[in-house]
Image: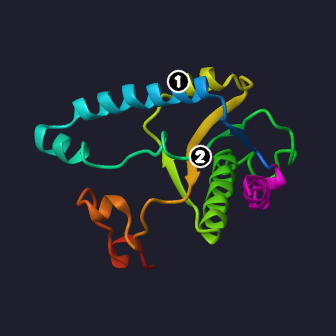
Amino acid sequence: MLAELLELATLAPSVGNSQPWRFVTVDDADRRAAVISNFEACNAAALADYDKETASSYATLKLEGLRQAPVHLAVFIDRETTDGKGLGNRTMPETSDYSVVLAIQTLWLAARAHHLGMGWVSILDPDKIHETLDVPSGWQFMAYLCLGYSEEEHEDPELVRHGWQARHSLDKLVLKR
């Protein structure tokens, strides 16, 4: 199923058809343990940065599924790719990043269509992830994803449900001219 989901993810649009995404499956137990250690260190530092009340709320949030998820997937952008011949990203180089995010979004939608959950673990040190996974130096870390069957299903996002951050109304997000 993972191969099918990744195949679908690679159908995402990309600037100049450059396909700058690079996926790394993390199956090795030692590498997974290093990622978990990375998360724990970064999470402890994040917790220490909040005031007491916010830290108390933060500590109750489910921020990762690193021990539970059967699939760990790191996503990188290959900044050195010559695919696409620079079309579209010479004037806006950030469109390569957006292309990778579109592949991640496509993967998420495909996973949900198969009743799988996907979590994006962002409380990580990118340099340590790069080192742990031993990827080419021209690749930049974009995401660490956990895929598997969710323990529970909800209509609302975790952070909304636990009072961390409410969703904004449309009138706050759309500017009319």
Residue 7 versus residue 171 in the image, above or below: above
Residue 120 versus residue 152 in the image, above or below: above
Give the residue drawn at x 38%, y 46%.
63
Location of residue 50 (image quadrant): top left
Q: Check disc 1 and give the amino acid type.
A: Ala
The disc label shown at residue 34, or none:
1
169 or 125, nearer to the observer: 125
Give the residue drawn at x 42%, y 64%.
152
The disc label shown at residue 70, or none:
2
Magenta stretch: give its range. Answer: 1-18
Q: Is residue 30 left or right of residue 15?
A: left
Q: Check disc 2 and give the amino acid type.
A: Pro
Q: What percent of the width, then of the height, locates residue 37?
A: 45, 25
Q: How crowded is the residue under tag 2: few (<14 C-alpha within 10 Å), some, or many (20+)?
A: few
Nearer the observer: mark 2 or 1; the answer is: 2
Q: How crowded is the residue under tag 1: few (<14 C-alpha within 10 Å), some, or many (20+)?
A: some
The disc label shown at residue 47, or none:
none
91 or 160, nearer to the observer: 160
Residue at the left extreme of this rendering: 52
In whole angstroms, how far apart are the C-alphas of marks 2 and 1?
16 Å
The secondary structure that dominates the magenta segment is helix
